[in-house]
Amino acid sequence: MSEERILDVPDGIDVLHVFCAPDGRYGNELGVVRDGGKLPAREDRQRLAGKLGFSETVFVDDPERGAVDIYTPTTRLPFAGHPCVGAAWLLDVPELVTPAGLVEARQDGEFTWITARADWAPPRELRRYATAAEVDALPVPPSGTWVYAWAWEDESAGRVRARAFPGRDDGITEDEATGAAALLLTHHLGRALNITQGRGSQILTAPGPGDMIEVGGRVRLRGAGPSGV
C-alpha cells in the first residue's frame, strides 16, 4: 500500500488525500504545485514529481481556468482520476483543462465529482476475482502490467472491493485509490459503483451519457482531520 514517505514538502506544494473513507482516513496522496509557472519545463516537473514520490503530482498552470498538468514519478499523464478530483476540490472550479480534454467538476456536500471519458484513462488490466477475500490476500504482482484487481462485495448494491497495482517499477507498488481504474471498471460494468480500495479508501462512480463517467470522493488536506492514514 502507499504510505506517507515525504515528511518535509517544499513551500508552494499542497499534499492532499483523495478518496478518503467516511471517517476521513486513507485516500491516495497527491502533491499539488499551486504555481506551476515557476517550473514550466517538463523535465523539471518530472524531476520534482520523482523526488516527491507520490503516485501523481499536479502542476497548476492556470488556477482560474483549472489548467493542470499531471505526472507520475516517471511519466506525464494526459488524464488521471485522483489528481483531477483533488485539484477540483482545491481550486473549486467548474472544470479542469487537461491534455486529454475538459473535465467537468462539481461539489456535492462532502464529495467532489469529476466527469471524464472512459477512453481518456490509461490502459489497465481489470482482473476479476471470485471474492473480496481473494483480493485482500493478493501479493503484489510482477511489474510490467497495470492490474486493477476487483471482486463484488455486494453485486446487487454495486459494492466492489478493489486493489490497484501500477506495475511501473517506480517505487509505487500499490495505489491506495485510483480514479481512472474505477472509471474503466464502471464503463466495463455499465453501472454505478461504490468501491472500497486499498486500506479503506472510498470511490463512488456513475455512468453518464455516451462514454462519460462521473467519479467522486472525499478530499482532505494533509494534517487536517483524523490521523491514522
Image: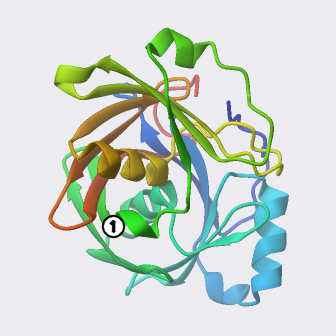
Q: Residue at horizontal 76%, vertical 89%? A: 41
Task: Determine whether 171 is above or below 162 in the image.
Answer: below
Q: Residue at horizontal 23%, vertical 29%? A: 158
Residue occupied by mark 1: 116
- Identify residue type, mark 1: Ala
Task: Determine whether 144 is above or below 104 in the image.
Answer: above
* Left or right, 110 with reference to 203: left
Q: Residue 166: where, in percent of width, then height?
A: 67, 46
Q: Residue 160: where, in percent of width, then height?
A: 36, 27
Q: Could one spot residue 216 in this view of the protein?
A: no
* Left or right, 197 with reference to 113: right
User: Of residues 62 and 115, which is closer to you in this image?
Assistant: 115
Residue 149: quadrant of the picture: top right
User: Of residues 93 and 47, which is closer to you in this image?
Assistant: 47
Q: Residue 96: where, in percent of width, then height?
A: 38, 77
Q: Quadrant of the N terminus?
A: top right
* Left or right, 71 with reference to 204: right
